[in-house]
């Protein structure tokens, strides 16, 4: 006879792995996956999956991880393991920023969480905090208005194909 706790634990682990892969695939599509330095749409030197090399916090993370930023700037290619390490750092920061932005984050439907984490990953907390009307709509659990506020922003115009995908996540949530 199979232990039910083991089956339940296995199901939870599978669900966590699926969620992790969903986020990874979303960011890989939205940010790209590059093992060498490139300039993002704002002209900032970036690598991996949207890892901003000019951000002081990211530079400190690289130093703490034993990754020489000067070698990267000189053209060294990252390994997949290094890219994933940087991605995990960025993703953790994006989750923290999304949670700070929305005190009800943990209670949101998964598509709303994904939309907020995507915006936090792309913008950071300071710029995300500029979405005052979207936040007000979220506080009312009005995802339709929140998605409209996303569309009515400079962010939406700047991110091209990412915007409609992220808005679709917000719109798909049930009130």
Image: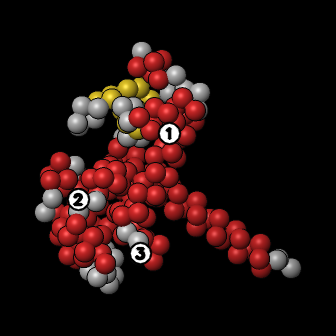
Q: Which residue is mark 2?
A: 130
Please indicate, yes or no, whether residue 165 appears anywhere in the rendered image. no
Marks 3 and 2, how far apart at CA: 18 Å
Marks 1 and 3, how far apart at CA: 27 Å
Labels 2, 1: front one: 2
**Quarter the C terminus occupies:** bottom left
Judging depth in this view, the residue of 125 and 116 nearest the camera is: 125
Q: Is residue 43 left or right of residue 36?
A: left
Q: Disc 3, disc 2: CB below 8 Å?
A: no
Judging depth in this view, the residue of 63 and 13 nearest the camera is: 63
Q: Which residue is mark 3?
A: 104
Which mark is on residue 86?
A: 1
> Which of disc 1 and disc 2 is earlier in sequence?
1
**Quarter the N terminus occupies:** bottom right
Q: Is residue 164 left or right of residue 6?
A: left
Where residue 55 appears, x then y in whole percent? 38, 36
> Which of disc 3 and disc 1 is earlier in sequence?
1
Instruction: Please tell me which residue is depicted at 25% across the width and 74% down the height of the picture.
Output: 136
Instruction: Please tell me which residue is depicted at 41% across the width and 71% down the height of the picture.
Output: 103
Judging depth in this view, the residue of 64 and 19 nearest the camera is: 64
Above or below 12: residue 119: above
* Mark 2 nearby-residue class (10 Å; few <14, some 14–19, many ≥20): few
């Amino acid at each position: 006879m199979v232990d039910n706790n083991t089956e339940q634990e296995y199901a939870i682990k599978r669900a966590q792995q699926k969620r992790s892969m969903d986020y990874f695939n979303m960011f890989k599509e939205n940010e790209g996956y590059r093992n060498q330095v490139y300039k993002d749409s704002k002209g900032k030197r970036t690598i991996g999956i949207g890892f901003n090399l000019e951000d002081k916090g990211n530079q400190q993370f690289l130093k703490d991880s034993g990754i020489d930023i000067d070698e990267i700037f000189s053209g060294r290619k990252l390994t997949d393991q290094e890219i994933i390490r940087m991605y995990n750092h960025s993703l953790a920061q994006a989750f923290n920023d999304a949670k700070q932005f929305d005190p009800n984050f943990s209670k949101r439907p998964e598509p709303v969480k994904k939309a907020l984490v995507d915006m936090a990953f792309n913008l950071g907390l300071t710029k995300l905090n500029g979405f005052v009307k979207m936040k007000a709509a979220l506080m009312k659990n009005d995802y339709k208005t929140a998605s409209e506020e996303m569309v009515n922003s400079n962010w939406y115009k700047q991110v091209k194909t990412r915007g409609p995908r992220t808005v679709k996540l917000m719109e798909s949530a049930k009130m």
